[in-house]
Amino acid sequence: MKMFPILVLLAALALGVSAQGKCDPATNCQLPNCRCFLDSAAPGGLNLTDVPQLVVLTMDYILNEEYEPLYNQIFVVDNPNGCEIRGTFFIQNQGSNIGLVKRYFDGGFEIGVNSNDGTIPTTQRDLINMMKNIKQELKTAGINETAVKGVRLPQLSTAGNIEFTAMGNTGYMYDAGCVTNQYDQQLNYKWPFTYDFPPTENLCTTGTSPTLKYPGKWQVLVADLAWKDSKCPSPAGCPGIDTKKDVFDLLYNNFASHYEGNKEPYVLVLDPIWMKTDYKLEGTVEFVDYIRAAFDDVWIVTVDQMLQWVQTPTKKADLNDFVPFKC
């Protein structure tokens, strides 16, 4: 009989240890620095009617004088607070004009890293060197290294544990290159989450997601786009986009899937090839102009601004005073 309380205590302790191994938004994974992968609720437990629709425009690879006038056509409308919309550039070092990159940064755009030359580093050491080198280039140009937070590897690939270990060694906060063809439906889009408690499945269509814990490191999933009978990771990857109307329909229909669902962020990937085709650029501009004119709860923001909202959820009625969204 004397052994019974000890056995109960040991069982309770064992259960406690087991519980600590599971991600729980109520106890061991709370904002601003942790969010569970399986948490389907809006950040902060906000009612859906209070959640803004965040649209995140991201651009990959080279930024130089050739592409400057093309990108500038997109970023001319204002958010509901009167500030011009902004996006995130994931920069390829080779071929980019770092002075121009600095001007975009000074204008409110976010700068992340993509690669040295458009190829994917294959080892952890190569990843670390790439992340350090580009951050140093940007620092030399006058961009504070603490402002360079995001990584997206070429070809929307991911490198799992070695990528996130490299991110930890070089001061990056998030990856935005994990394309998913699993969580790309209105009923299962995902909010950004951290790897305090890594999922057991591989989330990324190209490459791998981490299997180890990386506390406070964020994953921004890129949901496949639906287009007719196909799926595509980015607009440039969609077949049969032949007219400006096709472009608008592709971008708007996938936007509507988010907006009419649970309003998870709608992340779009634009690249130079897409931008250099006249009707594709025109359709993209038309889409951006339309959603800002037609919806008073749509905000077009950078990845960093979106993550700051996730970390500090704010009702859409109060966003005019939300500091990260200000000019």
Image (spheres, grey):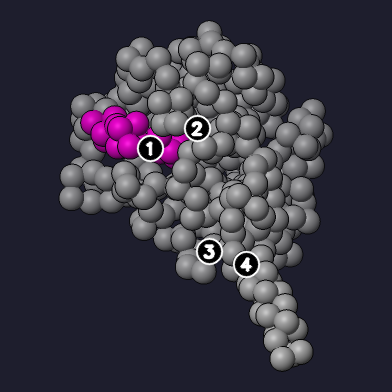
Label 1, on which residue? 262
Of circles 3 and 4, the one toward us is 4
Q: Residues within 10 Å of mark 4 (few under 14, many from 20)?
A: few
Residue at 23% across / 44% down in the picture? 227
Q: Nearer the viewer, residue 263 or 166?
A: 263
Whichever of labels 3 and 4 marks the residue nearer the N terminus, that label is: 4
**132 left or right of 316 in image:** right
Please give the residue where the numbered disc 2 appears in the rendered image.
Answer: 46
Which residue is labeled 4 in the image?
19
Q: Quadrant of the C terminus?
A: top right
Q: Is residue 123 left or right of residue 219?
A: right
What's under tag 3, amino acid-wise?
Pro
* Label 1 with label 4: CB-CB less than 8 Å: no
Which amino acid, by three-letter code, is at mark 4? Ala
Which numbered disc, 3 or 2, marks the residue that appears first in the sequence? 2
Bounds of the magenta segment: 249-273
Q: CA distance from mark 3 to mark 2?
A: 24 Å
* Mark closest to the chain's N terminus, 3 or 1: 3
In terms of depth relative to the viewer, which is nearer, 273 or 175?
175
Residue that sits furthest to the left in the current view: 229
Q: Give SS at disc 4.
A: helix
Q: Earlier in the sequence, mark 2 or mark 4?
A: 4
Residues at discs 3 and 2 in contact (Cβ within 8 Å): no
Residue type at mark 1: give it: Asn
Cα distance, mark 1 to mark 2? Answer: 11 Å
Residue found farthest to the front: 1
Quadrant, the N terminus: bottom right
Q: For marks 1 and 4, give the one nearer the viewer.
A: 4
The numbered mark, 1 or 2, whose residue comes first in the sequence reads 2
Residue 65 appears in the picture as rendered: no
Label of residue 199 in the image: 3
